[in-house]
Amino acid sequence: MAKFRELSKESVKDREMKISEYWNEIDLLHESVDSRDGHDNYIFYDGPPTANAKPGIHHVISRTLKDMTCRYKTMKGFKVKRKAGWDTHGLPVEIEVEKKLGLTSKKDIENYGVEKFCKECRESVFFYESKWRKMSERMAFLVDMNNPYITLDNNYIESVWNLLDEIFKKGLMYEGAKILPYCPRCGTGLASHEVAQGYEMIKTTTVYAKFKKKDEDAYFIAWTTTPWTLPSNVALTVNPNVTYVKVKYKEEFFYLAENLATKVLGEDYEVVEKFLGKDMEYWEYEQLIPEIETKQKAFFVTLADYVTVEDGTGIVHTAPAFGEDDYQTGRRYNLPLINPVNEEGKFSTTIYEGRPVMECDADIITYLFENNKALKNKRLNIIIHIVGDVIHL
């Protein structure tokens, strides 16, 4: 009777290392590619991961899925070229270096020296690249690590500029404004994945502001969680298909959505008139905080489907400089873009000049109450996104 071959009592780890060494010895990656000349190509570009920290177990999982796909395609007869890549630009890298150097602001970086800081960033990404390479080799992730694309490489950068040049030549590029999340500490706009890195719950004071209708002694009521944006208000937005009411409440007249009147005012009000939002288009009102002049037509009611009656008043305070929906409404109605906030997140004009905008909420609300421009306020928990230790607007 034949006997089974006895395996040595080496550990699984030792056996894995021997297999890995053998694969490296026979150059398995390139062998799997070269042996399929003439077959259909299947091209794989890795990620790329951002080289700003050591890899974690979740990176092993994602790389396993990538490797499984490439191996499967290889077994199906494809010529699978696999190129590694490294994302070496952006805030994650810079924040890591800031922590290392003890820097806390854009001004600190400028005082330290931009070139010196960039040199530290380059050294940092290649330090972490070596950690990623070691992890990838240890888990037998078959990918060409010796010829990666690296976003800081001049050839890579030039290829991106070349693509932009071709897009421009085809007339597919235009100059305009875009609303982005912004970090005042870092002094830069944020990409979606940077915004998604974390969030923090904070308690803030919201306000129901009273916008006086221009041709009568009545007010539009609009609720906002960001009072600091009120100096930039240029319009109010309603849903064209929602029913709105004019009500009498404590000897004053207010406009708001019918479905939210009781929630905002309680039971003690009288409905004077009803109409659809579309009937309110271009109704004019007085500027809420007359700090900033504009020569463009502004301070009237606009229409948009994004306005809901789930909370607030059904009337949205609109400041095109501080929200994507607001901005799109501003484009449709040719509204002015009023942005009195500088790169440090401080007011650059108005009576609040030089102060961080979020610290001005209380003063703005006080001004509204003192000038009969606020119905009420309320404390509320809201979520703000953070980048590392950084809060963004």
Image (cartoon, rainbow, N blue to C red):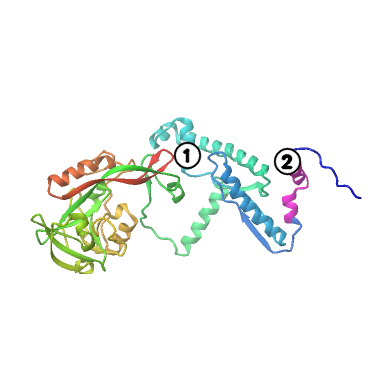
In this rendered view, identify the residue nearer to me: 303 or 247. 247
Question: For the residues marked 1 and 2, what is the alpha-carbon distance in whole angstroms?
Answer: 39 Å
User: Is residue 192 visible in the rendered structure shown here?
Assistant: yes
Q: Secondary structure at mark 2?
A: helix
Q: Local crowd at mark 1 within 10 Å, few (<14), some, or many (≥20)?
A: many
Mark closer to the observer (1, 2): 2
Q: Is residue 249 left or right of residue 169?
A: left
Could you tell me residue 118's position as x and y percent? 50, 38
Residue drawn at (51%, 37%) of the image: 121
Question: What's the residue type where badge 1 is placed?
Answer: Glu
- The residue singled out by tag 2 in the image is 12
Could you tell me residue 302's position as x and y percent? 24, 63
| Badge count | 2
Query: Which quarter of the picture shows residue 256?
Result: bottom left
Q: Secondary structure at mark 1?
A: helix
Q: Local crowd at mark 2 within 10 Å, few (<14), some, or many (≥20)?
A: few
- Which residue is at the far right? 1
168 in magenta: no
Question: What's the residue type where badge 2 is placed?
Answer: Val
Query: Which quarter of the picture shows residue 269?
Result: bottom left
Residue drawn at (34%, 56%) of the image: 324
User: Is residue 299 visible in the rendered structure shown here?
Assistant: no
- Which residue is at the far left? 251
Residue segment shown in magenta: 12-33
- The residue singled out by tag 1 in the image is 94
In this rendered view, identify the residue nearer to me: 298 or 99. 99
Mark sitting earlier along the chain (1/2)? 2
